Image (tube, rainbow, N blue to C red):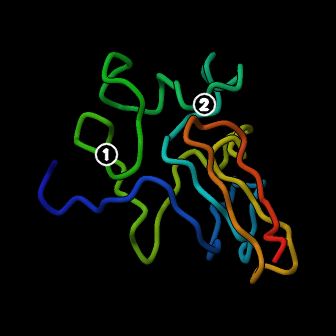
């Protein structure tokens, strides 16, 4: 690990701002973010295996999957245990494979679940 690296793989939060090309999200959306970073365009992403993306990691495909808050080899992506986080590739057509939106109005009773393998995220309502 590089000293000063922000840790944290998965994240939950509220979107504060979006880039001009990110059309799947808007400020105020409550989201859950998977641990892996994926481009949305490679063969793995198009087939739905975004956790196997071999394009997002700038350390060449042989370096393996890119993820948030990992060692230097997993890419230059700071972790999600932070007040604010920037999510790369949020404008990709398959961004919702690694960032899920919860539309439940009763958000105080909502549990957000992020699958460990980068499959499509989903929301589940707590039945208490």
Instruction: Evaluate if marks 2 and 1 touch, with contact meaning CB atoms under 8 Å apart.
Output: no
Residue 77 in the image: state x and y as whole percent: 36, 49
Q: Tell me the residue at 64%/74% (across/down).
A: 14
Is residue 20 or residue 50 the one in the foreground?
50
Is residue 5 or residue 105 the one in the foreground?
105
Q: Residues within 10 Å of mark 2 (few under 14, many from 20)?
A: many
Q: Residues within 10 Å of mark 1 (few under 14, many from 20)?
A: some
Residue 44 in the image: state x and y as whole percent: 61, 19
Q: Secondary structure at mark 1?
A: loop
Question: What is the quadrant of residue 112 in the picture?
Answer: bottom right
Is residue 19 or residue 30 the one in the foreground?
30
Residue 50: numbered disc: 2
Q: Tell me the residue at 33%/16% (across/down).
A: 62
Compared with 45, 26 (above or below) is below
Is residue 13 or residue 58 the one in the foreground?
13
| Residue sitting at the far front | 128
Q: Tell me the residue at 31%/45% (across/down).
A: 76
Check disc 1 and report the residue beneath it: 76
Q: Secondary structure at mark 2?
A: helix
Q: Nearer the viewer, mark 2 or mark 1?
A: 2
Q: Tell me the residue at 17%/63% (across/down).
A: 4
Report whether 92 appears left or right of 1: right
Q: Quadrant of the C terminus?
A: bottom right
Report whether 62 appears left or right of 25: left
Q: Tag 1 or tag 2, which sits nearer the N-term?
A: 2
Disc 2 to disc 1, C-alpha distance: 18 Å
Compared with 29, 49 (above or below) is above
Report whether 62 appears left or right of 23: left
Compared with 99, 17 (above or below) is below
Exactly how many numbered labels are in the figure?
2
Residue 36 in the image: state x and y as whole percent: 49, 41
């Amino acid at each position: 690990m590089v000293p000063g690296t922000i840790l944290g793989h998965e994240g939950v939060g509220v979107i504060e701002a979006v880039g001009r090309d990110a059309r799947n999200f808007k400020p105020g959306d409550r989201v859950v973010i998977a641990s892996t970073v994926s481009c949305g365009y490679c063969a793995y992403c198009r087939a739905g295996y975004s956790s196997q993306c071999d394009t997002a990691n700038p350390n060449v495909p042989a370096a393996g999957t890119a993820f948030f808050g990992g060692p230097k080899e997993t890419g230059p992506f700071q972790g999600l245990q932070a007040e604010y986080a920037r999510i790369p590739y949020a404008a990709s057509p398959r961004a919702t494979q690694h960032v899920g939106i919860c539309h439940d109005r009763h958000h105080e009773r909502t549990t957000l679940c992020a699958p460990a393998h980068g499959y499509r995220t989903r929301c589940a309502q707590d039945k208490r």
